[in-house]
Image (tube, helix red, strand yellow):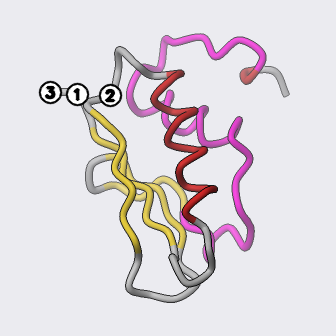
Amino acid sequence: MKPTITIEYCPKCNWLLRAAYMAQELLTTFADDLYGVTLQPSETGGHYSIRINEETVFDRKEWSRFPEIKEIKQLVRDKVNPEKSLGHSDKK
């Protein structure tokens, strides 16, 4: 079964647009590799995290910043399709 990504965001911080943008990028890049992307409003203020199934691959508080979309694509690729080329997102 294909994995599901959950982007949990703080609605009080107005992070829905950021979460929706990341969801769109992930769905476009991994159209054949994902079951779907879910946006989940957090009950915890200031929370922003990304999970693949139940595994957290990004947490804003642990990283002390928001991720670049390139970083998230690389993290997701490494979990869902390690052989996939990300084109310009693979370049450092």
Q: Are marks 2 and 1 in contact (CB under 8 Å)?
A: yes
x and y percent of residue 41 in the render?
Answer: 40, 71
Q: Amino acid at mark 2?
A: Leu
Q: Amino acid at mark 1?
A: Lys
Q: Quadrant of residue 69?
A: top right
- Confirm whether the magenta stretch covers residue 66: yes
Residue 58: mark in rendering: none
Q: Are marks 3 and 2 in contact (CB under 8 Å)?
A: no
Residue 2: mark in rendering: 1
Earlier in the chain: of badge 3 and badge 2, it is 3
Is residue 78 toward the left or the right of residue 17 in the image? left
Q: Nearer the viewer, mark 3 or mark 2?
A: 2
Q: Image point 73% across, 21% down: which residue?
A: 90
Q: Secondary structure at mark 1?
A: loop
Q: Alpha carbon of mark 2 to alpha carbon of mark 1: how far?
A: 5 Å
Q: Residues within 10 Å of mark 2 (few under 14, many from 20)?
A: some
Q: Quadrant of residue 17?
A: bottom right
Q: Residue at label 2?
A: 34
Q: Image point 74% across, 68% down: which residue?
A: 65
What secondary structure characterizes most of the magenta part? helix
Q: Residue at label 3?
A: 1
Q: What residue span does the magenta drawing correspond to?
A: 59-88
Q: Residues within 10 Å of mark 1 (few under 14, many from 20)?
A: few
Q: Alpha carbon of mark 3 to alpha carbon of mark 1: how far?
A: 4 Å
Is residue 25 toward the left or the right of residue 2 in the image? right
- Confirm whether the magenta stretch covers residue 44: no
Q: In the displayed image of the protein, which residue is found farthest to the right?
A: 92
Query: Above or below — where is 70 with respect to 66?
Result: above
In depth, the one of 64 and 5 nearer the eye is: 5
Q: Are marks 3 and 1 in contact (CB under 8 Å)?
A: yes
Is residue 59 toward the left or the right of residue 88 in the image? left
